[in-house]
Amino acid sequence: MKNTILAILIIFISCQDKKDEESGPLVGTWKLIEMGKYTVSGKCSGDVDDEEYRGLKSQGFTLELELKKDGTGIETRTGPNAGIENFTWSQLGQTLCIKNACVPYELAANEQTFRINLKEDAYCIDEDYNITGDDNRRACESASTSNEWIPEVCATERYRKEL
C-alpha cells in the first residue's frame, strides 16, 4: 500500500514538473530586430522602409520584451525615451495581447522570431489635425484645400528570441 501511494505521489509530482516546463514558444526574452513600414501602401508584405528605425538605432535605441510564463512581462528600452515598463500579456492562437492591445502575430517555424504587422486605415485630417468623416481622397481634398489625405499604411516589427 505504501509503495502504491508513493508511486502515485511520484507520478503526480513529475506531471506537475512537466506542466511547469511547458511554457509556450513566446515565453522568453525577445529583442526588436526590425521595425518600419512596408513600401507598398496598405500591403503588409514586401520591402520595408526602416529608415526611422535605423536612425533610432544610431542613437542607441534598443527594445527588449521579456515575456514570463505567469503572464507578466518587462519592456526595456535604451536610447531615446529609455525606460523599463512592467505589463501583462497573453496569447490566444495567433493573437498576442500586450498592455491590453491585441494584434495578430506570425511565429517563424523555428520559433526564434516573430513578426507583428499593424495596419492603419486611411483617413482625412483638416487644418487643425482633426480627423474628418471623409472616407476617400477625392472627398477629403474637395471638402477643403487645407485637408490632407493620409493613405493606409502597414507597419511591421520583428523580434528575435535571445538565447
Image: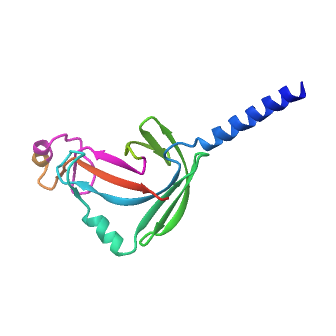
* Magenta extent: 111-140
Q: Nearer the viewer, residue 123 or 126?
A: 123
- Does 114 lie within the magenta span? yes
Quadrant location, the N terminus: top right
Instruction: Point out residue 5 in the picture as x, y percentages from the top left corner.
Output: 85, 28
Above or below, 72 relative to 163: above
- Front-lying residue, 43 or 28: 28
Whether residue 69 sits left or right of residue 44 in the image: it is right
Is 17 magenta? The answer is: no
* Tally of numbered discs: 0
Q: How is the image coloured?
A: rainbow
Could you tell me residue 114's position as x and y percent? 39, 49
| Left or right relative to 36: residue 161 | right
Looking at the image, residue 50 lies above or below residue 126: below
Q: Give the percent coordinates (x, y) of residue 109.
A: 38, 43
Give me the residue at 49% from left, 40% from top.
Answer: 91
Q: Furthest residue to the front? A: 3
Q: Which of the two residues, 26 or 117, is positioned nearer the viewer here?
A: 26
Q: Name the residue: 15% across, 41% down.
A: 136
For this orientation, the residue located farthest to the top is: 1
Write down the quadrant of residue 10 in the picture: top right
Most distant residue in the bottom direction: 59
Q: Residue 113 at what x, y percent from top left? A: 39, 51
Looking at the image, is 91 positioned above or below residue 51? above
